[in-house]
Image (tube, rainbow, N blue to C red):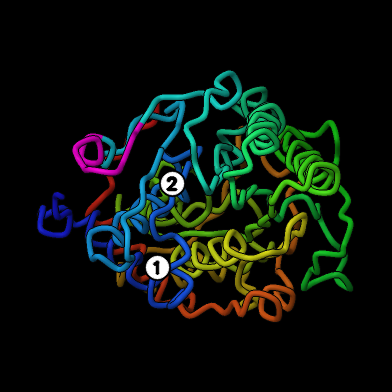
């Protein structure tokens, strides 16, 4: 098996380091994957890429009694990551161009991670129909497969924190029991509403057909493998900085978010996948610090040590701020209590790791 760490590819090194953190965090839970077959949809995406490297790390370092086999599916609508060619030559990894909406010819697998959905607002608005049906038709294809193939031990569906809409202050930090308030026709509805319906589908397949599906609600993940061209806030800020440009805020900068570093997030998702909480939803993210976009911009500049500043502008997209929540912060008591989940990487450390990654990996192009 090729040793990616020794390939002199610094992007690989960062993802391997994160994989080590995930393995250490999961500890004995890693063994549940021994000898198993795993399907990852949306494998070319931000989360999918880190999942790929985590499973590679398990095999490469002989952490399991028996190696695992990974099927990585993606329609590559946003291009082919550099790792695809390398993993095509690694035993136990099968990289295939597949559209989960139209292709239900699944391999025989034990675990399914359904991460095939665009999460960047700029891009899911560019591909609204593909976004909707990946979360609905693609999900249904997976669940139907599980109904007819009881070899499937667990399925993880990626929902989103955006199903909560724009909670009032009394519902922040936001618990899983908060029902949310989301526009069904707004510019973000293709993503938000399809995720909400996806959760409903999962819960009912679990109840009616005893399908072992679980639901993750991510809160603002970031880190290596998130494209610098992704158009979410952290890569946007670092793209400005790397180009020696002032950070441009297209809002008043008062909206707040908490951010969760990729290794902490993936550990949380794997804890959900390996649990017995079928039909349940879990918030995965950081409870603090809840930081404004202006404060985040200033912190990003501080990390870079460049003499830049924050400037304000107005987006040419009239719907840029439509239905954009003012605050987003999770209550993760459920994950802490039932999954023994806790985050480890603080925001400044995570931003430093991400900035260093972008310094070496900033030539990504979008299709």
Label 2, label 1: how far apart the Cα atoms are: 43 Å
Residue 249 versus residue 291 in the image, above or below: above
Residue 165 in the image, given as x and y percentages of width and height: 80, 52
- SS for callout 1: helix
- SS for callout 2: strand
Q: Residue at x 49, y 36 (%)?
A: 108
Q: Residue at x 57, y 47 (%)?
A: 313
- The quarter of the picture where the C terminus appears is top left
Residue situated in front as seen by the camera: 317 or 280: 280
Residue situated in front as seen by the camera: 354 or 104: 104
Residue 268 in the image, given as x and y percentages of width and height: 56, 67
Judge whether residue 264 can be spotted in this image.
Answer: yes
Residue situated in front as seen by the camera: 109 or 116: 109
Residue 280 in the image, given as x and y percentages of width and height: 76, 59
Mark 2 or 1, which is nearer the eye?
A: 2
Is residue 191 covered in magenta? no
Residue 136's quadrant in the figure? top right
Residue 193 in the image, given as x and y percentages of width and height: 79, 38
Q: Which residues are magenta?
A: 85-95
Residue 204's quadrant in the figure? top right
Choose the circle earlier in sequence order: 2 or 1: 2
Residue 60 versus residue 97 in the image, above or below: below
Contact check, label 2 and label 1, Cβ < 8 Å: no
Name the residue that disc number 2 marks. Answer: 37
Q: Residue at x 63, y 32 (%)?
A: 145
Using a 10 Å C-alpha cutoff, classify the residue at mark 1 as few (fewer than 14 neighbours), some (14 to 19) or many (20 or more).
Answer: many
Name the residue that disc number 1 marks. Answer: 301
Is residue 94 covered in magenta? yes
Residue 37 versus residue 246 in the image, above or below: above
Judge whether residue 240 can be spotted in this image.
Answer: no
């Amino acid at each position: 098996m090729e040793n990616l760490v020794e390939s002199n590819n610094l992007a690989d090194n960062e993802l391997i380091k994160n994989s080590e953190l995930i393995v250490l965090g999961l500890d004995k839970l890693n063994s549940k994957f021994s000898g198993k077959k795993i399907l990852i949809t949306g494998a070319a995406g931000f989360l999918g890429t880190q999942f790929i490297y985590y499973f590679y790390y398990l095999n490469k370092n002989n952490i399991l009694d028996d190696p695992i086999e990974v099927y990585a599916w993606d329609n590559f609508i946003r291009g082919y990551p550099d790792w695809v060619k390398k993993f095509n030559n690694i035993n136990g990894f099968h990289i295939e161009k597949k559209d989960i909406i139209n292709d239900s010819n699944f391999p025989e697998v034990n675990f399914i991670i359904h991460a095939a959905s665009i999460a960047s607002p700029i891009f899911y608005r560019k591909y609204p129909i593909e976004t909707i049906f990946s979360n609905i038709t693609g999900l249904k294809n997976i669940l139907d497969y599980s109904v007819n193939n009881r070899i499937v031990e667990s399925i993880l569906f990626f929902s989103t924190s955006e199903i909560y809409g724009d909670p009032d202050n009394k519902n922040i930090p936001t618990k899983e029991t908060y029902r949310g308030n989301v526009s069904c026709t707004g510019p973000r509805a293709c993503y938000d509403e399809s995720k909400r319906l996806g959760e409903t589908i999962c819960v009912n397949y679990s109840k009616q057909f005893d399908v072992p599906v679980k639901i993750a609600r991510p809160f603002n993940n970031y880190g290596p493998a998130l494209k610098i061209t992704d158009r979410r806030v952290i890569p946007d800020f670092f793209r400005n900085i790397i180009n020696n440009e002032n950070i441009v805020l297209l809002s008043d900068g008062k909206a707040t978010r908490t951010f969760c570093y990729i290794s902490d997030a993936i550990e949380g998702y794997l804890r959900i996948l390996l649990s017995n909480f079928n039909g349940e939803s879990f918030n995965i993210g950081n409870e603090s610090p809840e930081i404004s976009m202006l404060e985040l911009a200033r912190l990003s500049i501080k990390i870079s040590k460049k003499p830049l500043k924050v400037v304000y502008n107005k987006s040419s997209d009239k719907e840029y701020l439509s239905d954009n929540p003012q605050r987003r912060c999770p209550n993760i008591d459920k994950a802490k209590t039932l999954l023994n989940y806790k985050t480890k990487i603080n925001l400044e450390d995570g931003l430093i790791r991400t900035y260093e990654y972008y310094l070496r990996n900033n030539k990504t192009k979008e299709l």
